[in-house]
Amino acid sequence: MIYEVIISTMNEDGSSHVAPMGVSQKADFVVLKPFKPSKTLDNILTQKTAVMNIVTDVRVFAGVVTGRSNFNLVALPCDKGFFLKDALSYLTLSLAEIHDDDIRSTLYMNKVNVTHLSSFKGFNRAQAAIIEASVLMSRLDLLSQNKIKQEIKYLEIAISKTAGKKEIQAWEWLMEKYENYCKENKKKIKLLVSIRSIEEVKVVNGLNIDIIDLKEPKNGPIGMLDFIDIKKIVLALRDNNFCGKVSTTFELNDGNLSGADIAKIENLGSVGLDYIKVGVSADGNTWANLTKFTESLNKIKNQVLRNKLILVLMITDKHSFKFIRNISPSMVRKFSGIMIDTLNKESGSIFDIVNVTELNIIKKFTLENNIDFGIAGSLDVSHTKLINQLQPNWVGYRGGVCLKKRSGPLSRARLENLIDSFY
Ligand SMILES: Cc1cc2nc3c(=O)[nH]c(=O)nc-3n(C[C@H](O)[C@H](O)[C@H](O)COP(=O)(O)O)c2cc1C
């Protein structure tokens, strides 16, 4: 059995050091297992003594983890160390034996003296929650962000129901640390995930996805969904309090917009979509198709549409890069972003067709024209390192977050794994 206590030790200069530790009992020994490097370990090896404080003022746990050090300590006579004034009891310990390995030491400590200062009043759930949250906060870089969020949500219940002033203060310190950590580690690349149905709205519920894209992968690389389905999914997402952006794609074909096409685009603009992606293959006809399309844009009544349009250039091979480079600044400025995607989903990821250097050239071109740059195309968690190197504004996923094939069901576990890979 492990008990969470506060170990106080003396530094070489005579000052105090305080650390939460889990301790156990073996025969008559108190056993400590500090991970290396550890100031507590160094001090015990030098001084051969430590004080084990049994506390219910959990501010000490939260305080240490959040970088506080102004604890109410009392010095023991003859340089024997320090104890916490508000401890229920404290034990002075002396080092008996040490078992060492590269990761952590196991210290066997003799109990020298026990002093009782006040009585134990009973268990308090908020105090236990603070200890759990302190462990979480001391392991922020090791645990998954989703796990941390879920646990905080759960621990908050005990805090809201049973905390006193000390526990509330400890909780505030811990949450302040967590908020700062999130701010510093906030991912800059926005994640776009394509979903195709109301069922998949449930799969993405509560996940940290920036843009939900609506498409039916079975209908090809652009995968236009029926207008009525788009409307239903947008409503379901908002009902589920999804507060990111929502997009869908419109297939451009030869760029000539018929009256029906224009009506379709205008309709899409009216159902609460934030972005309408216009998909066009990057080939010898791209320039001509885009010229026709940008001219047709003038026919679209709703001017707001212009801030919503994203140009998706579907590439097939190395030549596609050349065609993209031919696009003029005046043409791209009609869009609020450019996304490079692959046309043939069976021929590897976008990185198998164009390399980071080539993508960087396109990124530079888009940013110079004050529009955003995104990529997609058979991407999965294995590409996160390359994506972090490239730093696009958005990155899009479908097949890589599905079970089996691109048209298979969306996998929540794969999505969580992917999101985690960006922190
Ligand atoms: C409840 C709780 C229990 C902990 N138990 C241990 C432990 O058994 N061993 C350890 O090395 N660190 C443990 N930690 C983390 C240490 O307190 C923390 O890393 C501290 O800075 C130790 O390093 P130091 O000896 O250099 O001060 C625990 C933290 C908390 C909040």
Image (cartoon, grey):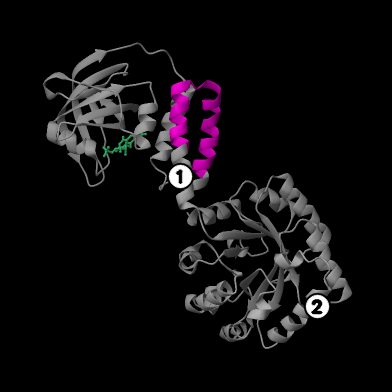
Label 2 beta carbon less than 8 Å to ligand 1: no
Residue at the farthest left position = 78
The answer to whether the residue bearing label 1 lies less than 8 angstroms from the nearest atom of ligand 1 is no
Q: Which mark is residue 296?
A: 2
**What segment carries the magenta color?**
147-175
In the image, taking residue 160 as reference, residue 298 lies left or right, namely right
In the image, is residue 241 part of the stretch drawn in magenta?
no
**Numbered tag placed on residue 217 in the rendering:** none
Q: Position of residue 94 (x, y in %)?
A: 16, 26
Q: Amino acid at mark 1?
A: Asn
Dot 2: element: helix
Do we see residue 253 in this rendering? no
Residue 73: x %, y % from top left: 26, 23
Q: Is residue 294 visible?
A: yes
Q: Which mark is residue 180?
A: 1
Left or right: residue 53 compared with residue 259? left
Q: Residue at x 44, y 26 (%)?
A: 128
